[in-house]
Amino acid sequence: MRVPTMLPVAMLLALAALVAPPALFAQEEDPPVPDPAPVLTVSIMDLYNFSVHLRLDWTDSDNEDAYKIYRTQDESKLADFPASWQYIDTVSTGTTIYHDYQVQPYDEFLNPKGTYYYKILAVNTAGETESNVSYETMPALNIQAKGDHSGICFIDASGKGAGSGPTGLLLLSLCALLLAAFHRRTRMPTSGFSR
């Protein structure tokens, strides 16, 4: 009588499963979702400079592959994350600082919602972890000369004038001089021309 050749192979595999370490037959598991959740803060940078922007800082999570950055100016849509938020960028693992230069100063007509809200997602193949919501209000434009934009000066978000510090005083003085020079130039008489 002939014994099928498959029987000894099956027996060897069963015996190997009993004595082999479990890691040999285990499936590769996904890493846990990033933890802890990033803690986000936002601050104004270069307030008295033409490159005024917002800086995002957050704490590093474990097991993240990247961070996704989102922004909104609509306070009523804070709970509808991320659907109603604008995706800005993805940064690599270990990155904890981002500079957002795509923000505008507060302006009553051009940017009446001068506050920017941010949220970070720490992501990997197992899922994502949300940060807190952090926000900052951009400085306002102080427009003089009845809205003709000829005297633009930044003031800080607290409503104090740009002259509240030594650098701000210099900037405010420079703006006043430029504004005066502009108005003198536009009011010059047109002598020498006749109808």
Image (tube, helix red, strand yellow):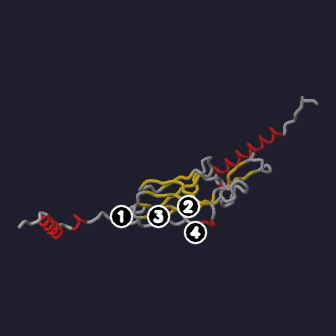
Q: Is residue 28 above or below residue 165?
A: below
Secondary structure found at label 4: loop
Question: Going from the N terminus, do you reach mark 2 or mark 1 first?
Answer: 1
Real-space Cα separation, disc 2 to disc 3, in angstroms? 12 Å
Question: Going from the N terminus, do you reach mark 2 or mark 3 first?
Answer: 3
* Residue placed under numbered mark 2 in the picture: 118
Mark in the foreground, 1 or 3 = 1
Question: Going from the N terminus, do you reach mark 3 or mark 4 first?
Answer: 3
Q: Position of residue 33 (x, y in %)?
A: 40, 66
Real-space Cα separation, disc 4 to disc 2, in angstroms? 12 Å
Q: Position of residue 13 (x, y in %)?
A: 16, 66
* Residue placed under numbered mark 4 in the picture: 79
Question: Going from the N terminus, do you reach mark 4 or mark 2 first?
Answer: 4
Amino acid type at circle 2 is Tyr
Question: Going from the N terminus, do you reach mark 4 or mark 1 first?
Answer: 1
The local crowd at label 3, few if under 14, some if 14 to 19, many if 20 or more residues have their Cα within 10 Å, is many
Question: Going from the N terminus, do you reach mark 1 or mark 3 first?
Answer: 1
Q: Is residue 141 above or below residue 4?
A: above
> Which residue is found at the position 64% from the left and 51% from the top?
166
* Residue placed under numbered mark 1 in the picture: 31
* Residue placed under numbered mark 3 in the picture: 38
Q: Position of residue 141 (x, y in %)?
A: 70, 53
Secondary structure found at label 2: strand
Amino acid type at circle 3 is Pro
Amino acid type at circle 1 is Pro
Residue found at the far bottom of this picture = 18
Judge from the rendering whether residue 158 lies leftward or rightward of residue 27; answer left or right.
right
The local crowd at label 1, few if under 14, some if 14 to 19, many if 20 or more residues have their Cα within 10 Å, is few
The local crowd at label 4, few if under 14, some if 14 to 19, many if 20 or more residues have their Cα within 10 Å, is few
Residue 153, numbered circle: none
